[in-house]
Amino acid sequence: MANLFLKQAKQYSLTRPGYPQQLFDFIASKTPVHDVVWDVGTGSGQAAASLASIYKSVIGTDTSKKQLEFAPDLPNVRYELTSPNISRSELEEKIGTESSIDLVTVAQALHWFDHDTFYNQVKWILKKPSGVIAAWCYTTPKIDDRFDPVFRKFYSESKPYWDLVRGLVDERYTSVKFPFDPVDGCDHTGPFEFESEKLMDLGEFLTYIRSWSAYQTAKEKGVELLNDGVIGEFTNAWGGGENGRKRVTYPVYLRIGKVGDSLK
């Protein structure tokens, strides 16, 4: 996972969407205590920065040193580089002891994890019975009726270069294993839908595509996904507008649950 984003860490930090405030407000409303958050796979800190405005302390961890270099420096956020297969001793040293964390968050990264191992760590470190885990993903963006069909065709043609786990994102995390109890006030663990919006010009949108793991994989195989023909199609479909900028909407899908009293 870390290596997939090594060469495009800067593009990732500049063009990946943030997440809507409504998402964080919803998560906060389901977290009884707002002390300590573990943001796993924090990357360049998109979620950590928003969490820091609600929770007293945020611990952002990632296996990519390069990604962490672009994370925002905030007084109540501590970033830790962890090994891909984090041990119990490393968990205690860098994140916390048993039943010490109020909230675990995973933004656009759960599909990369070994779920059984990760969930055991979550159940060990979350406070019982009300500690909360919130994991979300965003799917392919929507722009307008003219551009979207062109982009959908391009995305479909990029499929051979995506890792198989990308299918979990395309399925909006509906099929991901999620062995937790519904949070208070909910009768299921999701997915709950939100939207993230970002104003972008075509150049910024192309840089967003270059931040894809699939783009890097294709490059390593000698394939340029954004060849002249594709860029020409995108340019024609993008059109004008105010300063060439368009509102890009990313559907966001949240799975949320609490640890409860029993291990499942």
Image (tube, rainbow, N blue to C red):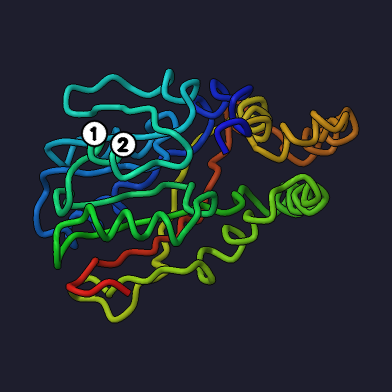
- Identify which residue, 236 or 162, lies in the foreground: 162
> Gap in Å between the C-alphas at discs 2 and 1?
5 Å
Pick the front one: 141 or 7: 7
Residue 105 at x, y = what percent? Answer: 32, 49
Q: In the current view of this chain or complex, which residue is farthest to the bottom?
A: 187
The image's mark for residue 93 is: 1
Label 2 crowd bin: few (<14), some (14–19), many (20+), radius 10 Å = few
Structural crowding at the residue carrying mark 1, measured as other residues with C-alpha within 10 Å and reported as few (<14), some (14–19) or many (≥20): few
For this view, does 176 lie left or right of residue 104? right
User: Would you say the residues marked 2 and 1 are in contact, meaning their CB atoms lie under 8 Å apart?
Assistant: yes
- Residue appearing at x 21%, y 56% in the figure: 126
Element at label 1:
helix
Residue hosting label 2: 90
Relative vertical location of residue 233 with respect to residue 256 in this rendering, above or below: above
- Say what secondary structure mark 2 lies in: helix
Q: Please tell me which residue is depicted at 22% across the width and 44% down the height of the picture.
A: 37
Quadrant of the rendering where the N terminus is positioned: top right
